[in-house]
């Protein structure tokens, strides 16, 4: 490696060019980033701009570039960095500082200078080669996953109950190495199913069946239509870059934030916001990420309305979106008139969603009904007398019961296989977010 300062650094970099010591890696265009775990308790933050030949590492080494930078570069050259990785704050700061340095004397971006054709061609060829290598790795990993799933079914699920945490960990780590991060995350959620009480084996078998369906769909991706192929790629862990997504024609509307959910996995916090368009009636989910408890940088606030562009990800049904231009903020709307449908209609929408995306966990709906506590369980009964179990955290359900006071009101929530998870309700045209 020509950028290595000496032979010992080169050798040390090669030893770090394995996924083991790395976490939170990612790549967008020429920008690479990751955290490398050393002997200390705090991992080193490593960023590289391949195009500009710039790099930065938080380690105290006096060598430049250090072994951590060299290890990250080798991982990238070997297509072992996750193109779906979430852009970290330290990588974003590094990218901004590079952009500031590239300003020309008259204040125009230096990027406006045409790229050398030979360099551009080499960059595109390198990107195509890395993409092809990732496809190969994913295919190998998904084939191994399918064999593992067959072994679990043939040998029985008793091993899962004996050691839920470690039962699927080895194959999950293999999925990380195969650059299928979403599959790895799904496998690492399986211990929760094992610990979910009576009937866990049936629920676990359902999750394994969904993974098997995903493995088969990946193997036959060339036969799928464009939308379903996009769903499969997303469920495996491929993502669309922000730049690509913002080129998708936007949907402008006045969007109301009707739900908020925070989750944490592998030290990465995710905030999912549910939105509903005033004029289009469309639903959208917008995701924000944070690492290390730094908070979420989002202009969207629960219960408020914003006039904005949303750019929807490819796939079906179109739900996940990225926030584009914000035209105006309107605060809390007081004239929402969503009538709310029946549970029969909500279940029909859920079936339609599953037919288009068999790996979906839920779909947003508005159901008009009454909330009650029956036999220790929270239940929503619609105006036709049909009932569904309410899911979610106990404090939120208690709050919903107290606020609705046994009145028939439109309840906003996410319907899924086990019931309805409420996120808000409407009262006199006002959205009350739980």
Image (spheres, rainbow, N blue to C red):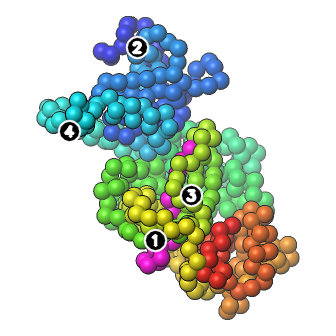
The percent position of residue 283, horizontal first and vertical second, equals 49, 71
Q: Nearer the viewer, residue 296 or 383?
A: 296
**Does residue 392 lie above or below 381 as drawn?**
above
Dot in front, 3 or 4: 4
Residue at 70 percent across and 52 percent down: it is 192
What main secondary structure does the magenta stretch of the protein show?
Answer: strand
- Number of dots carrying numbers: 4
Q: Which residues are magenta?
A: 276-290
Q: Which mark is residue 112?
A: 4
Q: Nearer the viewer, mark 2 or mark 4?
A: 4
Mark closer to the chain start, 1 or 3: 1
Mark 1 Cα shell of 10 Å, populated few (<14), some (14-19), many (≥20):
many
Q: CA distance from mark 3 to mark 2?
A: 40 Å
Tell whether 84 sits left or right of 174.
left
Q: How far apart are the two marked residues, 3 and 4, measured between alpha carbons?
A: 36 Å
Q: Of label 3 and label 2, which has the lower sequence position? A: 2
Find residue 224 and report its image quarter. bottom left
Q: Is residue 192 left or right of residue 254?
A: right
**Compared with residue 144, is residue 368 higher up or lower down, i.e. above or below?**
below
Q: Are marks 3 and 4 in contact (CB under 8 Å)?
A: no
Q: Which residue is mark 2?
A: 64
Q: Position of residue 77 (x, y in %)?
A: 35, 29
Give the secondary structure at mark 4: helix
Residue that protrudes farthest toward the front in the picture: 106
Q: Earlier in the sequence, mark 4 or mark 1?
A: 4
State if disc 1 and disc 4 touch (CB < 8 Å).
no
Whole-number angstrom distance, CA of label 4 to CA of label 1: 35 Å
Between 77 and 103, the one nearer to me in the picture: 103
Circle 1 is placed at which residue position? 254
Q: In this rendered view, identify the residue nearer to me: 355 or 113.
A: 113
Verify CB contact (< 8 Å) between mark 1 and mark 2.
no
Q: Which residue is mark 3?
A: 272
């Amino acid at each position: 490696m020509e950028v290595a300062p000496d032979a010992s650094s080169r050798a040390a970099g090669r030893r770090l060019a394995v996924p083991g010591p790395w976490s939170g890696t990612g790549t967008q265009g020429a920008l690479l980033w990751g955290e490398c775990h050393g002997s200390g308790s705090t991992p080193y933050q490593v960023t590289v701009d391949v195009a500009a030949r710039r790099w930065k590492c938080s380690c105290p080494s006096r060598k430049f570039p250090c072994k951590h930078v060299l290890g990250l570069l080798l991982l990238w050259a070997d297509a072992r960095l996750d193109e779906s990785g979430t852009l970290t704050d330290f990588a974003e700061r590094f990218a901004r500082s590079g952009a500031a340095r590239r300003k020309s004397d008259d204040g125009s971006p230096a990027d406006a200078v045409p790229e050398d054709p030979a360099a551009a061609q080499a960059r595109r060829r390198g990107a195509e080669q890395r993409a092809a290598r990732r496809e190969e790795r994913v295919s190998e990993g998904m084939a191994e996953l399918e064999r593992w799933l067959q072994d679990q079914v043939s040998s029985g699920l008793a091993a899962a109950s004996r050691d839920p945490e470690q039962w699927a960990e080895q194959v999950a780590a293999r999925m990380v190495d195969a650059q299928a991060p979403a599959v790895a995350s799904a496998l690492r959620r399986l211990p929760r199913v094992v610990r979910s009480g009576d009937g866990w084996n049936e629920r676990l078998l359902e999750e394994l069946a969904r993974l098997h369906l995903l493995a088969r769909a990946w193997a036959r991706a060339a036969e799928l239509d464009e939308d379903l192929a996009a769903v499969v790629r997303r469920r495996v862990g491929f993502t669309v870059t922000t730049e690509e997504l913002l080129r998708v024609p936007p949907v402008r509307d006045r969007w109301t934030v009707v739900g908020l959910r925070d989750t944490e996995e592998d030290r990465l916090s995710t905030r999912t916001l549910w939105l509903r368009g005033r004029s289009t009636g469309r639903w959208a989910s917008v995701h924000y990420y944070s690492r290390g408890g730094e908070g979420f940088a989002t202009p969207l606030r629960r219960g408020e309305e914003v006039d904005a562009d949303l750019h929807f990800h490819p796939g079906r049904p179109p739900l996940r979106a990225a926030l584009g231009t914000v035209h105006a903020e309107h605060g809390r709307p007081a004239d929402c008139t969503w009538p709310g449908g029946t549970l029969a209609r909500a279940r029909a929408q859920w079936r339609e969603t599953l037919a288009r995306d068999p790996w979906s966990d839920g779909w947003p709906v508005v159901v008009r009904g009454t909330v009650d506590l029956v036999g220790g369980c929270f239940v929503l009964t619609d105006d036709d007398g049909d009932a569904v179990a309410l899911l979610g955290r106990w404090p939120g359900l208690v709050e919903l019961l107290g606020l609705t006071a046994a009145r028939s009101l439109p309840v906003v929530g996410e319907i899924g296989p086990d019931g309805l998870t409420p996120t808000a309700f409407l009262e006199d045209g006002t959205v009350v977010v739980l």
